[in-house]
Amino acid sequence: MSTQSTQPASFSVRILQTAVAALFASLLVTALTPSTAMAQTQGDNSPSQQDKAMHYSLYYENLKNENFADARPDLRWILDHAPGFPKNDDRNYERAVELYAGLAERAEDENQQRAYIDTAATILRTAPEKMEAAGLSYDKYEWEIEKGRFLQIHGDIVPEGVEGLKTSPYHYEKAFGLAPERIDPYFINQVIQGYAEANKQEEALSFMEQVQAKRGDDEDVTKILSKAREDIFGKNPQARIDFLKKKLEQNPGDSETQKQLFDVLTVEGYVQEASQIAEQLLQTGDLPAETYRSIAEMQLKDGRPADAFGTYEKALNAGADLSAQDYFNMGTAMRRTGDLAQARRYYREAINAKSDFGQAYLAIGDVYVAAVSECGGSKMTRKDKAVYWLAIDMYERAKQVDSNLASTANNNIQTYRRYMPTQEDIFYVDEWEVGQSIRIDYGCYSWINESTTVRQPV
């Protein structure tokens, strides 16, 4: 009886792979230049081209099929004996990182997994120096990106303190420095997010300025920068102010930056600085309506009513749709300049825009009180006192349309009621009779031209 010897399947596969590799190796050797082939036949002690080709083809086929364990010995042979084979470039080192990362992914033991990742990290760290020494061609930019990607995926198990490896944002930023025009916007965003997570806002802004300078014409990059700035500035308005000031120093004539700086200074209460920016903006003479409105509000708060009124008029000319509050502010500006008739006009405009704008009624009442002081002075006549009836009418109207103003309105009524015409005053004015309607349109008050009712003194 004859016996038949059997070999394990893996051994048979290895024999087949070796045979295929040998065939592939012979093809590679044939493709070598005559000078290289001659060197091999003249007794060179280095591995033959056929050996190199065989180990290369064996590891490459296994790696391509994700047979990482089978690929490892041949790839290690290549790295030890022919790291640049066949094109004198970095492909074998790149594949070594891929191989050990693949082994780690399939490792069931945590310690083994960490060992594989440690090996991959070591290759990433040392490969550039080795390739330099061997004269291999490699792309420094791509290797920084590769380090960043590796750390982004495996950073939680990469041993701490591995020299030459930092964080994924760190390596993406280095890649940007090497080739800003090549880097994908995704990696730019990763750098910014890295700074944000570390609460390094100044560093983030500094990097973003570099990106703006190098890639500001890229729409996707611009969107990333805009969102990042909003996130940073929303948490730290002072950072936005500092950023805009620096930007304005670099380009003093940038009206858009001036507008942005004015807005944030106003919101944050930096009135004096906002005023200086406002003056620069007004000199341009070509602002959006909303910017005119903002400047006018600031000027009014800053105690410059005439300037505020003029700026509101510019807002109107620029096509602004003024609100009730805007008209109210225009009335206040006129009242502070002493133009009571114009003040009332704009308070009425505020009421036209918003019928329940009680503050405007209160303000008109105050205008009438101011008119008495202006026209009557310290020697009020009976007809001066009659204007207080009209002022009280306005206070009454204010609390009717807005109950929240009742307390203020009642206080005003109580204050000025004592100055209303007395019973004697009413007796001596022929046309006055309690309950009768009279018109305030005489003398200094001709601009008022409004009716009120004679009422019984309290």
Image (spheres, rainbow, N blue to C red):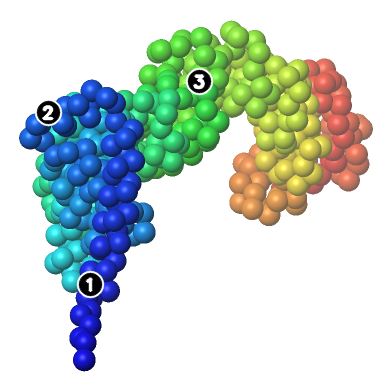
Secondary structure state at the residue bearing disc 3? helix
Q: Is residue 140 visible?
A: no
Q: Nearer the viewer, residue 229 or 135?
A: 135
**Kind of residue indicated by mark 2:** Gln
Which tag, 1 or 2, sits closer to the chain's start? 2
From this viewpoint, is residue 454 visible?
Answer: yes
Q: Position of residue 415 (x, y in %)?
A: 62, 41
Q: Nearer the viewer, mark 3 or mark 2?
A: 2
279 to 295, vertically: above or below: above
Measuring from the top left, give residue 185's x and y in whole percent. 45, 36
Residue at the location (68% across, 31% down)? 326
Task: Specify the quadrant that holds the N terminus.
Answer: bottom left
Q: Residues within 10 Å of mark 2 (few under 14, many from 20)?
A: few
**Quadrant of res 360:** top right
Mark positioned earlier in the residue sequence (1 or 3): 1
Badge 3, how many Cα within 10 Å: few under 14, some, many 20+? some
**In the drawing, does residue 137 fall left or right of residue 312?**
left
Residues at marks 1 and 3, CA–CA distance in whole angstroms: 57 Å
Closer-to-camera residue (34/242): 34
Coordinates of residue 401 in the picture (x, y in percent): 75, 50
Task: Identify which residue is drawn at 62% across, 19% down.
Answer: 308
Q: Residue type at mark 1?
A: Glu
Q: Which residue is mark 2?
A: 42
User: For residue 164, what is the image quadrant?
Assistant: top left
Q: Which residue is mark 1?
A: 108
Asked if residue 435 is positioned above or below residue 14 in the image, the reply reads above
Between disc 1 and disc 2, the foreground one is 2
Going by the picture, which residue comes out furthest to the bottom? 1
- Mark 1 vs 3: CB contact within 8 A: no
Q: Residue at x 72, y 35 (%)?
A: 323
